[in-house]
Image (cartoon, rainbow, N blue to C red):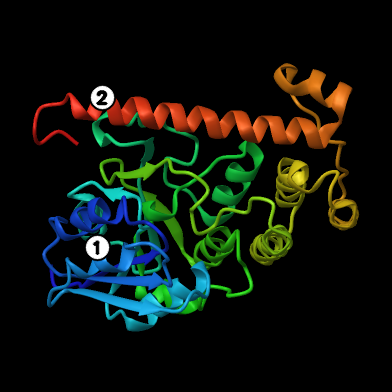
Amino acid sequence: MDRLVSILVPAYNAEHWIADTLRSAIEQTWPRKEIIVVDDGSTDNTLAVARKFSSPFVNVIAQDNQGAAAARNKALSASQGDYIQWLDADDVLAPNKVEKQLAVASKENLSTSTLLSGPWAYFYHRTKAAKFSPTPLWRDLSPVDWFVTKWRYNLHMQTGTWLISRELTQKAGPWDNRLLSNDDGEYLCRIIKNCAGIKFVNDAKIFYRMTDQSRLSYSGNSVRKIEAQWLGMQLQIAHVRSVEDSPRTREACVKFLQTWLLLFYPERMDLVAQMQALADSLGGSLRTPSFGWKYAWISRCFGLTAAKRVRAWYNWRKVTILKLLSSFAQKFERPGGS
């Protein structure tokens, strides 16, 4: 019970959500905690909203806009905790998330080299509407088994699920400021490769808010972010192979490349050529990306780029409508509903 937990919140233009996020951090049932918010030069009222929560254990720091990785490094450098809980400025922790993970660590006498994880679910406005859908990552795994499983099945593990010891944080080093996107994937890859194993705690929940393109790591059509995505992918593959360079890890790396190929194809054929060369060196090959039936006809008639744009527009409209429906439902709930 004497372990201090640092809840670190990088924030950029999150004025609509950060109050919910900070309340979820403050309401953590684990008693020894500090909360550090770093506003990365927001152009809205994020900083003003965050400062309303300032207290002896809630520290709000402002800096000029430098990107997600820089904001996270600033928060990390200001922290003192024995464990680190990363929390994006629009997500929400279950009240007992940290306590559940540390209780398991204590009960099972886990070393600080063990990485703690837990379940996560999407939501829009109401956390009680979130549906937790287990994946093959929702179990105890070795680092290599985690990487192979994630890339083989194209699975996602939300950043806030992890509770990371100071020991693992120091071994991993700082977030990579070069990565304007994919910084979380590369950083967590370093954390995982340095851990002794991953312990999944089924009741330690986090809620992942679906928002628009304002997320810190969103790539969009930015040339710099697309190139940062590719750099991050190369770094992740190198990290995995440094742990185990075997047929199963090389196969998983090729699958990882194939999964992300459509992001670069056909607009950045120079990067596609680099991806193919890397796949060749791993003993595999990449297929020309294609769409399912919903967008295949658009691709045939108007080209792959047009199909990608239509899909992006459709997904954006879908999220917008679902957010509106969730907001509408929230207004009719009893007071106190979330």
Task: Tell me the distance, in whole angstroms, between the alpha carbons under discs 1 and 2.
Answer: 25 Å
In the rendered image, the vertical position of residue 40 relative to residue 297, given as above or below: below
Q: Residues within 10 Å of mark 1 (few under 14, many from 20)?
A: some
Residue located at (68% from left, 67% from top): 242
Residue 295 spot, x, y in % from top left? 74, 22
Q: Determine the residue positioned at 73% across, 60% down.
A: 223
The answer to which of 204 and 289 lies nearer the viewer is: 289
Residue bearing mark 2: 329
Q: Identify which amino acid the numbered label 2 is placed on.
A: Ala
Residue at left 86%, top 51%? Answer: 272
Kind of residue sitting beneath label 1: Val
- Relative vertical location of residue 26 with respect to residue 306 in this rendering, above or below: below
Q: Residue 215, can we see it?
A: yes
Which one is earlier in the sequence, the residue at label 1 or at label 2? 1
Residue 251 in sight: no
Q: Is residue 77 above or below residue 99?
A: below
Position of 4 with respect to 319 (left or right) is: left
Judged from the image, the secondary structure of the residue bearing numbered disc 1 is helix
- Residue 147 located left or right of residue 38: right
Q: Which residue is mark 1?
A: 49
Residue 229, position as x, y percentages in the image: 68, 58
**Disc number at residue 155?**
none
Q: Quadrant of the N terminus?
A: bottom left
Name which residue lies at 23% across and 46% down: 94
- Is residue 300 found left or right of 190 in the rendered image? right
**Residue at far front of view:** 44
Q: Position of residue 253 (x, y in %)?
A: 73, 50
- The kind of secondary structure element at disc 2 is helix
**Callout count:** 2
Q: Which image quarter: residue 25? A: bottom left
40 or 181, which lies in front?
A: 40
